[in-house]
Image (cartoon, rainbow, N blue to C red):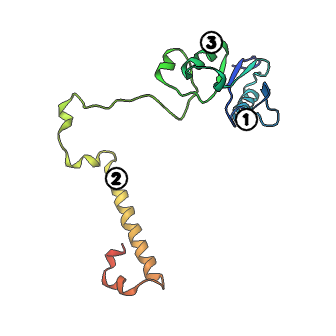
Amino acid sequence: VLQGLNISSVFECTKDYCNMKGDDLDPDDPGLFVVLLEELAKRAGFNWRDGYALVDPDKMGNKTFDELLAWSTESYDLAVSWWTETTKRIRTGIDFPEGWYEADIIMIGRSADESETEFRFNAFLKPFKGWLWFAIVVTIVVSGLIYYLLEVLDSRSDRRKLDKNPMENI
C-alpha cells in the first residue's frame, strides 16, 4: 500500500529515541525511532527521508502533549514518538498502531442487575471448567509426591522428619 510513497514525518526527539546533532539527525547514532522507521520504510517500500522534521519538546514552549500531537498530525503524515493512545485523541481522528499500553480511565461500579449480587460460595470456581480444576489438583498432588520422593532419595534430608510426618513434605 505504501510502496513508492513519500511520507512526511515528524520526530519528537528525546534521548536515545531520536538523537540530534546540530539541527539534523546524528548520523552515527540516530536513535531507536529512526532505526525502526528506517526498517519499516525498507519493508513497506516507502521513503521518509525527503521530508521530515525534528522537534525538541523542551523547546516547544508552553504546549501540552495533546497540542503537540495535534500540530504534528495536521502538518505531517506521521508523528513518531511515545504517544499514548487515549479516547480523546482517537475522537480527534488520530490513528494509532496496535500498542501495548492503554491509558484511559476506566470506572468500575456495581451492576444494576441485583440477581448477580447474591453470595455464592463456589464463585471462585467460575474462572475454570471442572476438568481444569481437576488437572490443577492432580498437578499439585503429583508435584508433592515427586518432591517427597526426591527428599527420600536425598542423602542430606532429615530422615526423622520424613518418617515422623511425611505429609509435611508433600
The residue beneath circle 1 is: 31
| SS for dot 1 | loop
Q: Residue furthest top?
A: 74
All told, the count of numbered labels is 3
Left or right of 140: which side holds 82? right
Q: Nearer the viewer, mark 2 or mark 1?
A: 1
What kind of residue is marked 3? Glu
Q: How far is disc 3 from disc 1 in space, using C-alphas?
A: 24 Å
The residue beneath circle 2 is: 131
Q: Which one is in front, 155 or 110?
A: 110
What kind of residue is marked 2? Trp
Q: How far is disc 2 from disc 1 in space, using C-alphas?
A: 50 Å
Residue drawn where x is 80% and y is 27% of the image: 22
Residue drawn where x is 73% and y is 20% of the image: 53
| SS for dot 2 | helix
Q: Residues within 10 Å of mark 3 (few under 14, many from 20)?
A: few
Q: Name the image quarter holding the C terminus.
A: bottom left
Q: Is residue 110 above or below residue 74?
A: below
Q: Name the image quarter holding the N terminus.
A: top right
Q: Residues within 10 Å of mark 1 (few under 14, many from 20)?
A: some
Q: Which one is in front, 13 or 158?
A: 13
Q: Earlier in the sequence, mark 2 or mark 1?
A: 1
